[in-house]
């Protein structure tokens, strides 16, 4: 493990040494994680590298199928809410 002292400005800015940025592939942005030992800086995940990581969760369904399914569930929910609203209105009348 390499430990390097860096200066922190009044605005809370610190420069990450180039060798550490290169080693950990930290570009223009970094992910700051609050840990018990202090602040951990990590590279920001690249969405393109994450492509396909949710395939098992969605069981091979396409994004179009997922959107249609979500819209269908939302439509069913709206119908139940409207039905409940009408029943409440009829009972109060």
Image (tube, grey):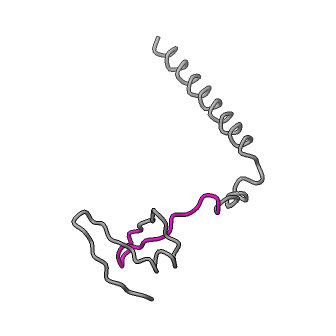
Give percent across and percent down for residue 77: 61, 32
* Residue 9 in magenta stretch: no
Q: Quadrant of the N terminus?
A: bottom left
Give percent across and percent down for residue 80: 60, 28
The magenta stretch is: 33-49
Name the residue furthest right. 60
Relative to the observer, which residue lies in front, 90 or 13?
13
Q: Is residue 21 left or right of residue 54?
A: left
Relative to the observer, which residue lies in front, 32 or 25?
25
Quarter assignment of residue 51: bottom right
Name the residue furthest bottom. 1
Name the residue furthest left. 10
- Give the answer, above or below, for where 24 lies relative to 13: below
* Residue 37 in magenta stretch: yes
- Give the answer, above or below, for where 14 lies relative to 89: below
Total count of labels:
0
Going 62% across and 26% down the picture, which residue do you hit? 79
Going 59% across and 22% down the picture, which residue do you hit? 83
Going 71% across and 53% down the picture, which residue do you hit? 58
Give percent across and percent down for residue 36: 36, 76
């Amino acid at each position: 493990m390499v430990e390097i002292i860096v200066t922190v400005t009044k605005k809370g800015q610190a420069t990450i040494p180039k060798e550490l940025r290169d080693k950990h592939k930290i570009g223009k942005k970094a992910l700051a994680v609050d840990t018990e030992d202090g602040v951990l800086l990590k590279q920001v995940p690249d969405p393109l590298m994450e492509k396909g990581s949710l395939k098992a969760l969605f069981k091979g369904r396409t994004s179009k199928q997922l959107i249609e399914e979500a819209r269908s569930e939302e439509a069913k929910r709206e119908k139940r809410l409207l039905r409940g609203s009408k029943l409440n209105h009829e009972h109060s009348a």
